[in-house]
Amino acid sequence: HYHVGVADVATKQKIVASCSARNWLPTSIIHPAAVVSPSAVLGAGVFLGPLATVSSHATIGDHALVHLQASIGHDAVIG
């Protein structure tokens, strides 16, 4: 398993490709104080920091980073 904590997209893509080639599985990290709607969809390997909020019917793509106190509105698509 792996998690990519790199914000630079090009670097992240290289790391993900390398890990995928080894058949490693991405792991999400979701802080216990993050709030996620039951109708939200989270991709593989996402990071949700403390007090991050993902609202109803929002979609967070694979390997996206949602940092401290960030709020993703309803029906939004990120990543």
Image (tube, helix red, strand yellow):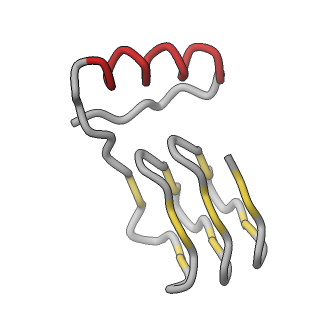
Q: Position of residue 1 (x, y in %)?
A: 21, 36
Based on the displayed image, in which of its 4 quarters is residue 21 positioned? top left
Based on the displayed image, in which of its 4 quarters is residue 57 positioned? bottom right
Residue 5, above or below 49: above
Q: Position of residue 17 (x, y in %)?
A: 42, 19
For the residue pair 48 and 62, the one nearer the viewer reads as 62
Q: Residue at x 62, y 50 (%)?
A: 67
Q: Residue at x 53, y 76 (%)?
A: 36
Answer left or right for 56 relative to 48.
Answer: right
Answer left or right for 69 relative to 21.
Answer: right
Residue 76, above or below 1: below
Answer left or right for 59 relative to 18.
Answer: right
Badge count:
0
Residue 19, above or below 29: above
Q: Residue at x 37, y 51 (%)?
A: 28
Q: Position of residue 9 (x, y in %)?
A: 65, 23
Q: Position of residue 7 (x, y in %)?
A: 62, 28
Q: Residue at x 22, y 19 (%)?
A: 22
